[in-house]
Amino acid sequence: MSGISVKICGLTRPEDVVAAAEAGARYLGFVFFEKSPRHVTPELAADLALACPVGVAKVALTVNADDTLLDAICAGGAADIMQLHGHETPQRVQQVKSRYGLPVMKAIGVRDADDLAAIDTYAAVADQLLIDAKPPQNATLPGGNGLAFDWRLLAGRKYWTRPWMLAGGLTPQNVAQAVQMTGARQVDVSSGVESAPGIKDAGLMAEFIAAAAGAAAPKLR
């Protein structure tokens, strides 16, 4: 076993929640961002959470959300981890941790080497980091665009002090290569396992998780 954990993000249907968990996903992500085709309301997420088995973490993805939305998400039981995917400051990360008593995963967008400095900044306050492709200029979505960044930026680097997850443009066909190049022990996928935006494909999810599990990740130093 490679010990690689998979997050299936952007789930919108109970049957997809069940299929992702049965395939071996460790994390299931719900998107609370109205511009996304994968957007769910706190009420729908509460229903989806009921299909999530014990032991699989529910991740609530929000983008520059206020406390009113976060309160509603938590009240419905749809969050074991808060994923902040906007321009939240380190101070906001700390506020969310303190208010809800939940682990916080902060997403960092990467396009080139200059973007890596933010990882160290947020590693000081977040419980986990999600290293994603930075969206194109004028993009409406901060993630879930099916874009990858240059994984060589992470190859051979000193690894950060917090657990981190690789995201951005991953598919069943390239996830093994991504793991091998970066040394990632956790990976995130959304559009790469869909038959349509927001509609997950059970076969693709199983294929992705099998490919990630079979990847020969290099040992971390």
Image (cartoon, rainbow, N blue to C red):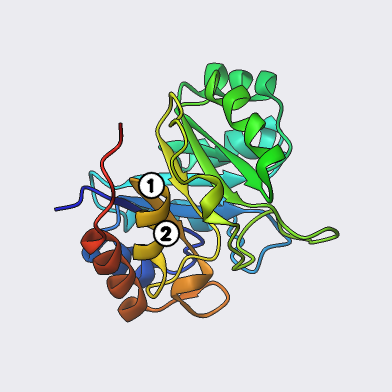
Residue at coordinates 44% horizontally, 55% vertically from top-left? Answer: 188
Q: Does 204 sit left or right of 53 as displayed?
A: right
The foreground one among 9 and 219 is 219
Residue highlighted by disc 1: 184
* Quarter of the rendering containing residue 119: top right
| Mark 1 crowd level (few <14, some 14–19, many ≥20, 10 Å Cα) | many
- Label placed on residue 178: 2
**For the residue marked with disc 2, what is the amino acid?**
Ala
- Residue under the image location 73 percent in, 61 percent down: 35
Callout 2: few (<14), some (14-19), or many (20+) C-alpha neighbours within 10 Å?
many
Mark 2 / mark 1, whichever is N-terminal: 2
Residue 122: x %, y % from top left: 59, 26
Give the x, y percent position of residue 96.
Answer: 59, 24
The percent coordinates of residue 21 (x first, y second) are 27, 60
**Across the whole image, how many numbered discs are drawn on residues?**
2
Q: Tell me which amino acid carries mark 1.
A: Ala
Q: Is residue 220 above or below residue 155?
A: above
Which structural element holds mark 2? Answer: helix
User: Residue shown at 33%/77% (left/top)?
Assistant: 202
Q: CA distance from mark 2 to mark 1?
A: 8 Å
Q: Are marks 2 and 1 in contact (CB under 8 Å)?
A: yes
Q: Quadrant of residue 174?
A: bottom left
